[in-house]
Amino acid sequence: MPYLLISTQIRLEVGPTMVGDEHSDPHLMSILGATKRTTLGNNFCEYYVNDAPRLVLDKLESLGYRVVSMTGVGQTLVWCLHRE
């Protein structure tokens, strides 16, 4: 999977960070130390780590990912990363 979205709520910029959905690469999620969970009311799973986004971005850079774009959506910060 060459593209990856990570996000966090603005008030939680020290973590946790959402690092993938239920279709994400399990090996990558394991490397990041992510756990899969379902939020009450959702019918899908997401992977989370307790790390701040900065630490997650550092880990992903060491794995060959580069930030393509970053934006704020309401109270959420979102980064799009790509790996060649």
Image (cartoon, helix red, strand yellow):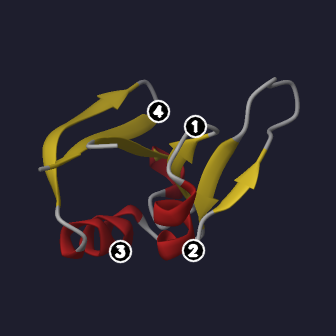
Q: CA distance from mark 2 to mark 1?
A: 16 Å
**Vertical arrangement, residue 54 with respect to residue 23, above or below:** below
The residue labelled by disc 4 is 75
Which tag, 3 or 1, sits closer to the chain's start? 1
Which tag, 4 or 3, sits closer to the chain's start? 3
Q: Which is more foreground, mark 3 or mark 2?
A: 2
- Would you call the spot at circle 1 few (<14 residues within 10 Å), some (14-19), or many (20 or more)? few
The residue labelled by disc 2 is 33
Residue type at tag 3: Leu
Q: Are the residues flagged by discs 4 and 2 in contact, CB closer than 8 Å?
A: no
The residue labelled by disc 3 is 55
Question: Where, by quadrant of the figure, is residue 63 drawn?
Answer: bottom left
Residue type at tag 1: His
Question: Where, by quadrant of the figure, is residue 60 drawn?
Answer: bottom left
Residue 15 visible in the picture: no
Q: Position of residue 69 (x, y in %)?
A: 15, 37
Q: In the drawing, does residue 68 fall left or right of residue 18?
A: left
| Residue name at image x 50 percent, y 51 percent | 25
Q: CA distance from mark 4 to mark 2?
A: 25 Å
